[in-house]
Image (spheres, rainbow, N blue to C red):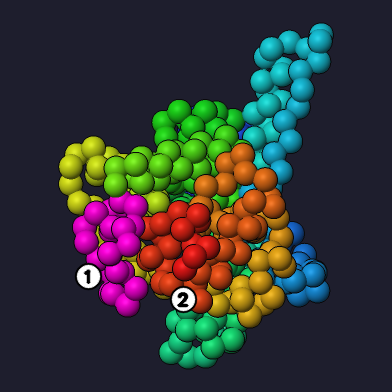
Amino acid sequence: MSHMALPLERCALKHLSWPTRPHFHHNLALSLRSIRFSTAHSLSLDSKRVSTRPHAALNPPASTRPPTLELPSRDRNQSIFKHYYRLGKSYVTFYKTGIKAIYQNYKLARQIQHEIPSGLSKEAALAHGSISRASYQLLLRTRRDLSRLPLFALVLIICGEFTPLVVVFLGLSGVVPRTCWIPKQIQGAQKKIEERRRRSFREGTLMKKEQRVDGKRIEELPKPALLHIGRTLGLYSEWWDKAGLRPPFLASSIRKKVAQLEVDDGAIRRGGGVALLDGEEMRLAAADRGLDILEKPEKELREHLRRWMAAREKRSVQYLLLTRPAAWQNT
């Protein structure tokens, strides 16, 4: 796991000589340096909580998801300037908590990596039972967040309290680790992908009875099917569609994602099924499989996820990604 070793100070603190916003830089530097010590002190306790909480084998720790964002309300006699100052501090606290979570997850991921036998991939280790689904998801999410951390740290240092505005209005969600996504980002990204999915189904990508994709390699699927799966899972930017071009490496991206879903399905089944997934993890699992989750009650989402798991006994992941839940009942 040496490729994941991105020291937090190296990726963020090396930019602290920036001549502007000195007080913010100084405070952020102190906060980031404190992460190492506070995390080291609490890591063993976090590990014990992960291992002893209910259904821990299925559900990764909450530190792999964004923390709660608590925003102050404006008092009647409070000036606008003071209100926005407090608002900015709340966002900075939120981001620092998210960065601290990445460091916690990185330390846990290093421990998990030692449990994987030499020569086995994460997917093979999960399929063989060497690691749990919770550990597998933690490895996936930590690697993703670490890859985004250096650039996001630079954005945070430059923009400070204005980072949320810059990220949302300039569309920079792709550089933000998921542990630092604010609710508006999460809502906006999910809404965008669900709208793309609905358009793709309306354009005729819906599976026809005479089509057969089970047993076919990803590279053998027709181009419209590959594009639809890519849109359904958000594997490429919509700018490729607008330009009328095929996204590069689409088949390999789909093949990798399908392999992850295949072993994840098996782990959920072995771990006791959909009923044992926490509410937030259930929603993430549903979204991960191309299901619409916005404004959907938990009961309905669990039912759709159960249908997915039942259909997977006979059908491939790529078939389910090309159809709607209503079609799975009779598979």
Q: Is residue 240 left or right of residue 209?
A: left
Q: Label 1 neighbourhood size at 10 Å, few (<14), some (14-19), many (20+)?
A: few
Q: Which residue is drawn at 56% across and 63% down?
A: 307
Is residue 17 at all visible to an observer of this figure? no
| Three-letter amino acid code at the position of disc 1 | Glu
Residue 130 figure quarter: bottom right
Secondary element at image label 1? helix
Residue highlighted by disc 1: 220
Secondary element at image label 2? loop
Mark 2 to mark 1: distance in Å? 20 Å
Q: Label 2 neighbourhood size at 10 Å, few (<14), some (14-19), many (20+)?
A: few
Q: In this view, does 209 lie to the left or right of 274?
A: left
> Relative to the observer, which residue lies in front, 53 or 231?
231
Residue 55: image location, x then y, percent = 75, 71
Residue highlighted by disc 2: 314
Of marks 2 and 1, which one's residue comes earlier in the chain? 1
Q: Which residue is drawn at 40% across and 51% down?
A: 232
| Three-letter amino acid code at the position of disc 2 | Lys
Q: Residue 61 carries which label?
A: none
* 227 relative to 25, above or below: below
